[in-house]
Amino acid sequence: MLAPGGLLLVLVVGVPLVVAGQISLLDLDQYTFRQWLDAPFVGLDNYVEAVRDSALPHAIWVSAAYAFLVTLITLPVGLAAALAAHDRFAGRGLVRSVLLIPYVLPAFVVGTVWRIILQPDGVADSAVGRLGLDAGLWLNGPRSFWALVIVQAWTAWPLLYLLALAGLQTVDPEVHEAAAIDGAGWWVKLRRLIFPYLRGPIALGLVITFLHSVNNFTLPFVLFGVPSPRDVEVLPVLTYVESFQNFQFGLSAAMAVFSLAVVAVPIVAYLRAVRLT
Amino acid sequence: MRHTRLLPRPVQTAVLVVLLLTVLGPVSYMVFASVSSDLDVASGAYLPTTVDLGAYRRIWSTVDLGTGLLNSLLVAGVVAAASAFVSVGSAYVLVRFAFRGRVAILRALLAMQSIPGTLMLLPVFVLFASASAAIGVQVIGTRWALGLTYLTFALPFSTWVMVTYLRGLPPELDEAARIDGASSWRILTRIIIPLSWPGLVVSGIFAFLLGWNDVLFASVMTDPDTRTAAVALQVFGATQEGGAIPVYGQLMAAALVCAAPVVVLYLVFQRYLVGGLTAGGVK
Amino acid sequence: MKAIRGAITLLLGSALLTACGSDDGGGTDGAGKTLDVLIGANTIYPEQQRKWFDDVSAKFKEQTGATVRFETFATPNDELTRIQTSVLSGQGPDVYALGTTFTPTAYSTKAFVELTAEDWTKLGGRDKFLPSTLGISGPDEQHEVGVPFTSRPFVMAYNKELLAKAGYDKPADSWDGLRDQAKKLTAGDVHGLAVAYADSFDPWKFIWAMSLQAGNPLVSDGKARLDDPTTAAAYRTYLGWLATDKVVDPAAVGWKNAQAIAAFGQGKAAFLPMVSATSKVTLDKSSVAGKYAYAIMPTIPPGATSLPSGGEGATSILSGDNLVVASYSKNKDLALSFVKMLTDVDSQRTYYQTFGELPTNATFAKELQADPALAAMVESSSKAVGTPFTGAWSQIQLALVNVVVQSVPGLSSGTVDDAKLNGLIKEAQSTAQGALDKAK
């Protein structure tokens, strides 16, 4: 019963991965890609060029920093949302659904909407202006980094909320009763009795949020376009531009392999921490 | 069970109000902008000065959005169903049988989440093109090839969800059946699947979302008859450059129309969603 | 007698043609075949474009029996991805409509049919086309891949009312003069110029034009010349409009081309440089309808009062679409007959009347010359110059725009930071040179 899924994964993920690895060792560009199997083999040249002469190190830094911040923001927000949506109240079903909307909206839609919100003289500027603050540039310059963090956090937090909410369902009913009798403050109760149950789902949520943020191509691409402002030149956009605009397929594949390494760090850490039996 | 509150009422209310505002602010702006004049949007007005539903009429003729929606429903729907059932089979094996490499597979499932789509695009395309040359049948541009790609990308997470769900089912259930001589296939179809609906729904929904939202693969693997809603939507975005004035109203209306099916899907299955992720617990 | 001779020639001619056709295995007899054509989605005339697809398909079916299937791409990025995947896999559309500036890169892939003398004959001869439109079809006459299909020379729209009020009867012919006019025209919420600083394509066209006018084509003999002082001057002029001259709406740092057109359409700008004839539809529906006109953009580079020696008075890049045939296509002859059909007088007329894009067909272009409304476009078309023909041009173009993108955040400070600008230009120069060095 493993066969159908396994076969698909080997064919549609495994084989292309090997091909991508091979491409990263070739001098593959607009002059050679028509006969790509004949492209000159250049060993690790592409990797060397990626590290030494490209924007890759900067992109790794931007990607990691932004994904880390997004993950950091989604934790308290998602957790608070789950706790608040857990207790019964009138209209709970509706509220729970509404809270999922940012996650459900296609990234292309999220990017488009926020780009219009954040454009100069747009609705964000007029809101900020009404507060008497300086309306500035959101889609380029230093603030663009924060725009990316905010928008990605806005669309990503409901996953953590969902997983935490699911985790809350697993809390033993006796724990609730014990907590009720105990008489301790709500915060102490949460910390001592409830949070231990949420450790697993939250760890999973954090890892997936980080991965999805690092690998999100559509959102930065739609928000800022290309060439990307330097402050938001993230890995997927850089690799996309290198291969699909600059035709440096070999270099781009090498960059993508590096970005695999970036996301491998939290994955490995997570897999070491959880018990898989 | 005596119900106890996790948060004091005022805290709960405050949290919910802040969150709802954060979510509904941009979402309501989408709705308002779709009925505003393009001028209002450009000048940063939140509320429309005039209400014009014309954008909702015009979007259908600007691009072939109808075909796009139909294709998306078809592809994402089939992917959702297929991934739920393929993943329950894999997950069943992974949860109930001990064999070498089992843990490695579980790890790989999660690790696969980390592969960037931009890395896979060209190789997948090359693969399909050579397959097509080998068997002499058109592959690229067909719905099933696109569906197959999405299915594969959806499988790791779907299987992971099913693994956690099936862990929550007491092993005694199928052990009893096994002692009675039932085959694994029979146990899966007669016992496991009927008990796993919430999990199946969740893994199906995540797969549906993946197929519905993808732009990268759909933009090169579809032709005019098979293009998905996400690709059709790009055309509205493209009006930003090259000659026409921006059609914010149509852009927002089309975005809302494309988002509606997934939002409805979540509204309908919202209850399963929590339950489906729950049972096994991820510890 | 003459009529009969004519009829005989015609008969003979068609018999010969048919014979040729059947000789090379099917030729233009396309019964049962399908030709795939990739072309940009027209966002201004979506419905008309669909109708045009149907009409063209019907006409081609009538002529050859073959079906044409049109595919569209939404953005240039989309098109690039599509071309790359198709070339890599050896399957995809038979005919592509490519932007002129992308033709050199397409040529360098060797994935498109190089047109032989015989091919040109099948297309109706090279003479059929306006000579200037053939300027970017290939590195030289013997190696051409692109067949000119439409021409979209860039011009400048100006608000006649605003100019008259300020005492100008026409836009200046030098960039310095234009800046001075723009300064005088800037008052209240009306600005002298509408410029799309956040557009992905517009900025490099300004830099290229100003550099070329000052005698620097940006690439010569395989060497990038972005570090030339003329290029720095071009950037300073272009960025200075907003930063120091303050003749552009500060919000323009976030504008795409469409928003610049919208601002001009609301009467909030006196000049709208770098637009093509396609803007006419939008502007005729706007509040400046009837109050604006087109003129060619200045041809005298920044800092000069007359064209310097060595400078070229280019009004526009050679802009428009070329049709190319994929070399993997199994329907080459069919594709050529299709390209021939699209570049014939009738098709070119229909295309112009439907979409407002200028013809490349010499005969039809002559017909249009008399139209005063098109004077500026026609003039610009004749003074347009092709961008350097190198496979690295796409990268150079991106590097040129990148300088603007990275400079934009600093503009609000009211100065163009020379040190920063020079650093960015240096980087662009090394990117451009690197790309040229890799050319094979």
Image: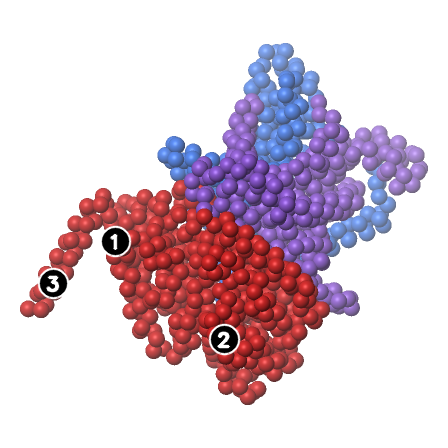
Q: Amino acid at mark 2?
A: Pro
Tell us which disc is closer to us: 2 or 3: 2
Say whether residue A45 is left or right of residue C10.
right
Q: Earlier in the sequence, mark 1 or mark 3?
A: 3
Q: Callout 1 environment at 10 Å: few (<14), some (14 to 19), or many (20+)?
A: few
Q: Which residue is mark 1?
A: C118
Q: Is residue C102 visible?
A: no
User: Mark 2 to mark 3: distance in Å?
Assistant: 57 Å
Q: Earlier in the sequence, mark 1 or mark 2?
A: 1
Look at chain B in the picture and name its colour.
blue
- Residue at the (28%, 45%) spot, across then down: C32
Between C121 and B281, the one nearer to me in the picture: C121
- Residue at the (6%, 68%) spot, across then down: C1
Which chain is rendered red in the image?
Answer: C
Vertical arrangement, residue C197 with respect to residue A260, above or below: below
User: Mark 1 to mark 2: distance in Å?
Assistant: 42 Å
Q: Are marks 1 and 2 on the same chain?
A: yes
Tell us which disc is closer to us: 1 or 3: 1
Q: Which residue is mark 3?
A: C7
**Are the residues at dot 1 and dot 2 in contact (C-beta closer than 8 Å)?**
no
Say whether residue C405 is left or right of residue B72.
right
Q: Amino acid at mark 3?
A: Ala
User: Mark 1 to mark 3: distance in Å?
Assistant: 25 Å
**Which numbered tag is attached to residue C308?**
2
Q: Amino acid at mark 1?
A: Glu
